[in-house]
Every structure is written in structure tokens, then in C-alpha cells.
Image (cartoon, rainbow, N blue to C red):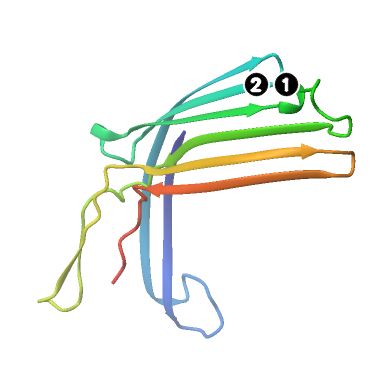
Amino acid sequence: MDNLNKAVSTSVRNFYARGLYTIENGVTKTPTQRYSNKKVNSLYGTSSLSYHDYLFLNATARNDWFSTLNPKSNSYLYPSVGASFLFSEALKNMMPSWWNYGKLRISYAEVGGDTNPYESTVYYSLQSNAFDGTCLLYTSDAADDLLCVDLGGRLILTKKKTTTIIYYDLFTSYLLLKPPHH
């Protein structure tokens, strides 16, 4: 992915003629120009295995290289694995006739992302008080990292009676936050 953003804009304050909101009518004009460039290269792989149509294993892996992070540590691998056991198929000779379908599943995944361009460097800004310079420090060499765990099951007893149970948990580490603006 290549995301190039170029913008030119002008903000206007204090107008000569009331109710006419044009650039030409503005007393104070502030032109701005913005430029940002962000690239993400990714590689993705998947694998699926099945055993006798009742035991399933799925695995994926994605590696991202982010241009917005430190080049020494801008590569991140995000794996996932999921397994399911279709016990109504594995134990079909032992299941009661009214039990149509039963499955248990578990999965684990890691996902993440980078930051906006130029937000992983040190920024300095001076406030109007000449003796009180404020340093807004933001240095992060890590990508967002989210870990997901999902446990669940599904039971279909008859055409009208279905039960689905899911437990889901999310753990966050290395979350990229913007510094507060003063």
C-alpha cells in the first residue's frame, strides 16, 4: 500500500463584506501546505487442515513492513491459529437422534498496525511564554499489538433450537498514542 497525501489550503479570518465567505473577501489569510507519504508492504500465508471432516486446524501469518516506524524495527509478524472439533460428526454413532449439530472451537490471533506518517519522531513546540518552552516527546519504535482469544461452541438440537456460546478476550500492548496538545 502506498498512501501519498498532498494538500494545499487557506484559512481566512475577518471578512471585508459580512456574509460573503470567500478567500478574496478575507482580511487575514493563512495558507498551509501538507505532505505525507506512508507505505506498508505485506506478505500473507494461510494453511487449512482437516481430519475425517470433524477436526479442523487453520493457521495464518501476515508480516507487515511499515515506513512510518524505525527502519531497524519496522517488520512485524501477526500469526493466528484456530481449531474446531465437530463432535456431532466425530461421535455421530453415540449422539441422540434429536441432536443435529455440535461444534467446539478455539482461536488465537495477533493483529496490529502502525501510526500516521511523521508521528514517531521528536517534536518541539514553543508556547507564547518565551521562558516556558514545551517539549512534546513522542518516540515509538513499536507497532500496535493486539492479542485476541476466542472460545466458543454451537449446538443445534432441532431446526428451531440453536445455541451459540462465545468467550472473547482482547489484550493490548504497545498501543501508539498521540501526545497531548497544550
Describe the element under mark 1 as helix, strand or loop. Answer: helix
State whether residue 11 is above or below residue 34.
Answer: below
Q: Nearer the viewer, mark 1 or mark 2?
A: 1
Describe the element under mark 2 as helix, strand or loop. Answer: strand
Which residue is rendered at x = 13% and y = 75% of the image? 132
Q: In the rendered picture of this protein, how many numbered marks are placed on residues?
A: 2
Camera-side residue of 121 and 160: 160
Which residue is rendered at x = 46% and y = 28% of the image? 62
Mark 1 Cα within 10 Å, few/some/many (few <14, many 20+)? Answer: some
Which residue is rendered at x = 27% and y = 34% of the image? 73
Question: x%, y% of residue 136?
Answer: 22, 62
Where residue 131 sits, quadrant-wise, is bottom left
Residue 98 falls left or right of residue 181: right
State whether residue 131 is above or below residue 115.
Answer: below
Mark 2 Cα within 10 Å, few/some/many (few <14, many 20+)? Answer: some
Which badge, 1 or 2, comes first in the chain's sequence? 2
Residue holding disc 1:
90
Which residue is rendered at x = 43% and y = 52% of the image? 7
Camera-side residue of 75 and 61: 61
Question: x%, y% of residue 171?
Answer: 44, 48
State whether residue 101 is above or below residue 50.
Answer: below
- Which amino acid lies under the numbered mark 2 shown in the image of this protein? Leu
